[in-house]
Image (spheres, rainbow, N blue to C red):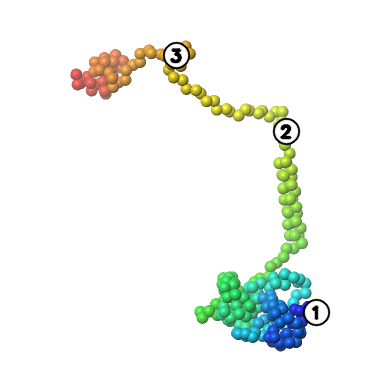
Amino acid sequence: MNLSERIRSCLSAPKTAADVNSMIGGNIALIRGCIQTMVKVGLLERIGDAKPYRYRVARPLKQKLRGYEKVMATSKAQQIRDWLKAHGPATNAQVSQGVSMKPKASSKTLCDMRKRGYVSRSEDGYFAFLADPEPVQGMSEDERREANRINNKRKRDRAKNAALKSVKRIPDKMTISMPKPVNVKVKTQSVDEWLKEGNKIDRSPTPSRFERLTHDEIVAGARRGFGGYQTPQARRFSQCG
């Protein structure tokens, strides 16, 4: 029988840690530490508002659990709901003391359970138990087989894609490889360099722009070039003359 079992065997009625130590002997500090651990996981319940606290058995130990699983067997929310079931409406301070939890952690858990509809809160700040969450339904055998089939297929697809990426693909004979375009930089030339290479500059006369024409050139050009039709600009210049 380990220390935890020896302690619980002494708690047929509420007792303090000192009472348990007088019954089973041993290190009082080790006994206190073991009691506090059992309170945290919900095996023991702490009674009293001030030291020395008394302790009693809250629930039996699940034999299948081992090691760290004992600590995680009962969640904080479940511990609070179980405590509220046994003691009725209570404030956050009372709940945190009853389940040996820090007030900030118990307040956060109570608020979350209130949003989910598991506990209620009165105007004077008392929380009361309403309901436990619905049990999680496990997958059936057919659903489990289908999930395993999908997972195995995904693993095979990932392995196949990884193998294809690792193999260097040989280009097909019908594949035409086009060279990448190369940007050719054209060197600029001066006029002297252009002439030295034997090139010539075209100096043929070009028609003057309209702004540079005289009045007579505009009138003569309008009559000659448009077959009697005069542009508005030519008509305006002819009227001015």
Mark 1 neighbour density, 10 Å: few (under 14) some (14–19) many (20 or more): few
Please tell me whether mark 2 or mark 1 is closer to you in this view: 1
Residue at position x 75%, y 48% in the image: 156
Residue 121 in percent (x, y) is at: 55, 77
- Asked whether the viewer can see residue 219, the reply is no
Amino acid type of the residue tagged 1 in the rendering: Met
Please give the residue where the numbered disc 2 appears in the rendered image: 170
Residue 1 marker: 1
| Earlier residue among tags 2 and 1 | 1
Left or right, 152 with respect to 236, comes to right
Residue 81 in the image: above or below residue 180: below
Farthest-out residue, left:
241
The answer to whether residue 65 is seen in the rendering is yes
At a point 58% along the width and 28% down the height, the residue shown is: 181
- Identified by mark 3, the residue type is Leu
Contact between marks 3 and 1 (CB within 8 A): the answer is no
What secondary structure is marked by label 1?
loop
Return the x and y of residue 165 as percentages of the image width and height.
Answer: 71, 41
Q: The residue tagged with tag 2: helix, strand or loop?
A: loop
